[in-house]
Image (spheres, rainbow, N blue to C red):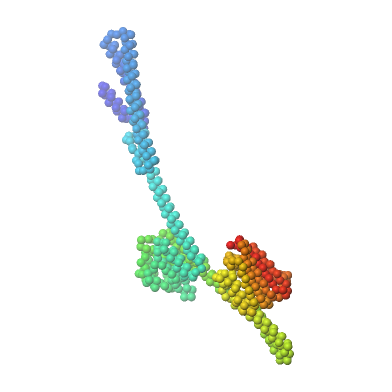
Amino acid sequence: MLSSFFRHLHNLWQTLNPRRSLRARLALTFGLLVLMLTVGLVVSLELTAVNQTITLNTLTVRLERQIWVSGLFLTVTFVIVAWIIAGHIARPLRIVAEAARELHEKEQEHVIPTFPGQDEVASLSRSLNILVANLRTQQKALREANDLLEQRVTERTRQLEILYDVLEIGNKKEALLTLLDRALRRILQESRAGVGCIHLLDQDSQQMKMVTHYQLLQPVVAAYACIPINLPIVQDTLQQESFWLINDVRAASYDPELARLINHQQALCLPIRRGERDLGIMTVFATESHFFERDEMDLFSSLADQLGIMIENDRLRQQAEQLSIVDERNRLARELHDSVTQALYSATLFAEAGQKQAQAGNMDKALIYLDDVLGTSRQALKEMRLLVHKLRPSTLEKEGLIRALDQRLKAVEGRAGIEQKLVVTGSQTFPANVEETLYHIAIEALNNSLKHAQATAVSVIIEQTDDAVTLQVTDNGQGFEMEMAVSGGGLGLTSMQERITLKGGTIAINTAHGQGTTITAVLPINTHS
């Protein structure tokens, strides 16, 4: 009977609700202890009453003793059961906590132990393992995303560097073909394509002419040095907005010769244009192990646009140079008309008048006209020498201020029979912007003296101190009325005043009719060094 009772009790223990098993088993344990204690007391009392005849006092004493023994047994049993239950609960939690701590501190592939059963500790360990697995999956995905981002940033930086270098190449003042060759090399040396060429459109022959190439086989260069504009590959490329990708060059039915010669899988053809004008084509080839990606094709498209800007800028630069040449020719024509032509025309009139007077026998008047012819011719010669000097390249940048002024005085005033003198005090080295300002003021003053003063001697004095440089140009000519010159706006006085004022300097003009002219310009150098 007792064994049957314990068997039913064991079945009850195993069939408890797993979600509340700890609490249920704890309650069952305490219930059994109380039941066992009660049964023990009852059995003890019954045995005592049956087997012995005892007095009430003796029964009371025994009952008290039995209560004390039972209480002590209950206390010990409770402590033992509580210790076992606490160990059953705390040990798995301690193991889980230790595993979590190691996982946090050491950041290694640590696995949290799992426990059998369906109680709270087992559920907690399984949940933590699932959480850790999800966390590791997210960390791996985050690392992969970070690596991908770094790769994209590196690739974008490389592309921007190529684009910047091509822009810098395009800003250089060199021949167009040289710039295109340097740009193509810079583009392909850093790309995974590595092979390419540039064709430019020749409007006269209506052909695409190869102007530069990189790493192309010589047979390909020879075969496609010039290709007609009506070739299918050219027309297909020019009809595209940004680029045209040929996925299999060898299978290109429109050009079997291209497939035979070129040992590449893909070809990217990019139109070079500016606005609506087609200027040429850039072609790059991919190797067997590489295929063009979208961002790479967009980069080549941007670079083709930059090549279009480069070509257009070269065309505009040539056009500006032609316009500059035309303007210079027109200016020289005006100067010839205003100076030399007028002087020669006056000399012709004086010569005709002198001839008539000589034929009439008025030799005195004829000699006067001959003197006028001589003076006018000399003035024309001065103007011509001045004009020739202007046509020569300026020596200011190459030789400096002192050397440039010395050459001017010898080439123009010296050959015109005018006594000239150049005096320099202090240092002969000046900042570039100071030299340019002083040179233009000195040349303007010398030109005025040559054209209008009829001087026989000029002097240029330059004196430099620690904080300023002084330029003084003096002639012994006929001078002029200052008020009339300023109101008339002639003699270049306004230009000289504007130049010196712009640099923070001052200019003074001392002249009077018949007393020569002295122009003094003072320019600070401490603020322009």
The residue at the point 40 percent across, 50 percent down is: 144
Specify whether 388 is left or right of 61.
Answer: right
Picture layout, residue 210 above or below residue 296: below
Q: Position of residue 379 (x, y in %)?
A: 66, 80
In terms of image quadrants, where is residue 330? bottom right
Q: Image height check: is 354 above or below 389?
A: below
Tell me the residue at 37%/63% (across/down). 287
User: Which x, y percent locates residue 23?
Assistant: 37, 28
Name the residue furthest front.
425
Residue 438 showing in the rendered view: no
Q: Nearer the viewer, residue 343 or 60?
A: 343
- Horizontally, residue 469 falls left or right of residue 115, namely right
- Describe residue 491's horizontal placement relative to residue 84 as left or right: right
Which residue corresponds to the image point at 26% horizontal and 21% vertical from the top-left? 1
Q: Nearer the viewer, residue 363 or 258?
A: 363
Residue 483 found in image quarter: bottom right
Q: Quadrant of the C terminus?
A: bottom right
Q: How many marks?
A: 0
Q: Position of residue 40 (x, y in %)?
A: 30, 18
Nearer to me, 118 or 190:
190
> In percent of the image, x 48 and y 75: which residue is there?
204
Q: Position of residue 317 (x, y in %)?
A: 53, 70
Measured along the vertical axis of the image, is residue 308 above or below residue 88? below
